[in-house]
Amino acid sequence: MIDIVSHRGRYFILSAVVILFGLISLIAPGGLRLGIDFTGGTLWEIEFGEDVQPGPIREALESLGYESVVQTTGDKTVLIRTRELSPDSPAKSAAVEALSDTGGEFVELRFESIGPTVGAEIAQRAVIAVALACVGILLYLWWAFRQVQGAFRYGACAVVALTHDALVVLGTFSILGRIFQVDIDAMFVTAILTVIGFSVHDTIVVFDRVRENLLRFPNEPFKLVLNHSLFQTLGRSLTTSITVIFTLLAIILFGGETIKWFAITLIIGIVSGTYSSIFNASQVLYAWTEGDFNRLFGRVFRSRTPAGPDVQGA
Amino acid sequence: MTRHFRWLLFIILIVVVAVWVALPDNPGIHLSIGGTRIDRDIEVRQGLDLQGGIQVLLEAQVPEGATVQPESMEAAKLIIERRVNALGVVEPVIQLAQNNRIIVELPGVKDPDRAVQTFGQTGRLEFVGSGSTPLQLGELVTTTLGGPEAPATDQQDGETDAAAPDAEPLVYETVIEGRHLSDATVGYDELNRVQIEFSLTSEGTELFGDFTTENIGQWMSILMDKEVISSAVIESAITRGRGVIRGGGSGYPLEEAQSIVIQLKYGALPVPLEIVQTRTIGPSLGQDSLQKSYVAGAVGLAIVAIFMVVYYRLAGLVANIALAAYAVIVFAIFKNPFQPVTLTLAGGAGFILSVGMAVDANILIFERTKEELRLGKSMRSALEAGFDRAWSSIRDSNISTLITCAILIYFGATLGASIIQGFAVTLAIGVLVSMFTAIIVSRTLLRILFSLSGGLGRNWFPAA
């Protein structure tokens, strides 16, 4: 039987390294490419009848007072990013005219324009939603595990695991944003919330087994019970993740362009979620229960007289 | 034995109904029960991102610090509904969001910008005093409402007229506006001439009373978006909040009176609305995405099915049957004629994702069964134990997913982000139905298999 719990130091360090890379990218300037859902502005994708160059398009819009970033997403299609353009305003009709003068007839593939207040709201709502999800999950797990000693810890460790996953996804997207110019939008927040849901789902399956084993074998040492539970749920965790990843791969390969990054976000989150359920959540639970943190900090503050019981970790 | 067959019958019934609902070209439900008639079509409602269309979020513009009355928002919503209906859009969606916003979705509309321009007009209604001379019908004037501003549109063709008229524009005083009007109807006076009868709110009564008392014999006009729609003389002070507008010697022509009354009641938005968010998807992009979603869904389902059979053998086959039932039932729920779920691209992704997660319940059960087998139990009792023990994991983990869905629905509700809500609702429905199919359907099938075959050997189920 594998002893996962004893090697927890290793896994903590691995997680820390992965998250650190992401954090560095996040903190550095241009951390997260925020899409118009958060900053407000216009995203306009149009398809012309003939090949076009971004330069003249940009100039045409600038002359109307709309500084824009224009990218080609195909020979004939361009993606325009600029400030808010309301469809019932004369500005948009003027822009339409200028564009058809420059590049010829075109078809509007998609047009999104968000006012600045709505953008800020979305950001705010996103943060609240994530916070609410965490609280809801904490409370539910506290209640569901009420028969076990130290019930609060299970919810807390699940939250630690999902925070790990959220950070991994954010960090990865910060890096992806730099390489592929991917924006964060409202769908990204949806993906993160889904990842959180899945991560907890996964973690709960492990904890559920821990609870059952603790109640069935109350006299076994905690470490043994944990390892046992982890081993028992390993097969299921991996298998479920594989099926979900299969379905997501199908979406990435065969689904439309617009849904691709959403699926990629989910895959990254689910891989991280599976990892965190097995290698993080239970380890934090163990470390907390067995007083690892006390000992760790006790060593740091060596000058203080050791207080409290001397807990022997097995 | 019979208990299991009863469950099987129940399941088959549900699946048959689901298949009938899910099939394309469904005739729908058309029948009469007692005195009531039910006429519903059963078809897939496609979201904006699939059939193309436009979604706008309108926000009420109020001065700093003021709040919008809920009645104003309700009235505004009704007015927009009328205007949108006039556009002939099939299945528009118009909803209130928070306390100062309206979501308008127009699926499949050919020229989204033009459509938005049509219903987005303010329709500002005002009564102004015009002194000793009447204003002409159709004239555009400047009023004190909203600050003196030059009339923005030339009445002929809607072009913006940049040059102001040569003389300094006269500013007319606005006495009351749309929100002061509480009702208007077409009525008849003692000589059976058509007149317009109106009543005012208490605030309107006061303002109107003061003005009419001081201006008897002067002219008043009713303006809609600064354009004169009617003019009349103030014959007496109107202090009780109820008044009539006579249309001159022979009264109003009936149609004109009716038109004015409609404008009084429905033409005026009680608050100006501004577009704060727009999303337009062109139809070609939408249809392309739809095709791709079908392919992705089919491929996803196929891969999972193959994997289940390879890994869990016969039990995997049973799980696949449960999965097929799952897919059909969920799709039928989306299509249901009483409260259909609009299918969006994200919703499709949610459905595909939930297929992967639906299998999870079965995986939990089968893995548990493997363990019980390892402990030496018989195939049958191992399966039963697998179902029993796995239930608490399934329940707890699915509830946490449902909590996340609830929060996603809340997150999307206030933003008109029906895309996010669509995803959450799809996922939630998927989770709930998967609990049913994974447990009830698989268990029934497996139990029946047992009773039919008199116990199967252990080699059709993979041991650890």
Image (spheres, rainbow, N blue to C red):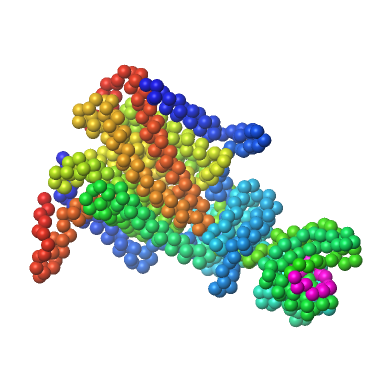
Is residue A191 shown left or right of residue B386?
Answer: right
Compared to residue B237, the image places residue B13 above or below, namely above
Percent coordinates x, y for residue A100 in the rendering: 62, 59
Whether residue B287 can be seen here: no
Q: Nearer the viewer, residue B443 or A25?
A: B443
Residue at point 75%, 73% (across, down): B239
Q: Residue A241 appears in which quarter of the rendering?
A: top left
Is residue B21 shown left or right of residue B438?
Answer: right
Tell me the quadrant of the picture where the N terminus of chain B can be found.
top left
Of all residues shown, which one is farthest toward the bottom?
B168
Residue at point 37%, 37% (across, down): B359
Q: Residue B464 appears in which quarter of the rendering?
A: top left
Q: Residue A228 appears in which quarter of the rendering?
A: top left
Percent coordinates x, y for residue A147 in the rendering: 25, 47
Residue at point 31%, 33% (across, down): B387
Percent coordinates x, y for residue B261 in the rendering: 76, 60
Residue B117 highlighted magenta (yes or no): no
What residue span does the magenta drawing correspond to? B222-240
Compared to residue B152, the image places residue B15 above or below, namely above
Residue B239 highlighted magenta (yes or no): yes
Is residue B23 shown left or right of residue B205?
Answer: left
Compared to residue A175, the image places residue B425 above or below, namely above
Residue at point 34%, 35% (across, down): B362
Of all residues shown, which one is farthest toward the front?
B240
Whether residue B325 can be seen here: yes
Percent coordinates x, y for residue A36 in the rendering: 48, 62
Q: Nearer the viewer, residue A283 or A215?
A: A215
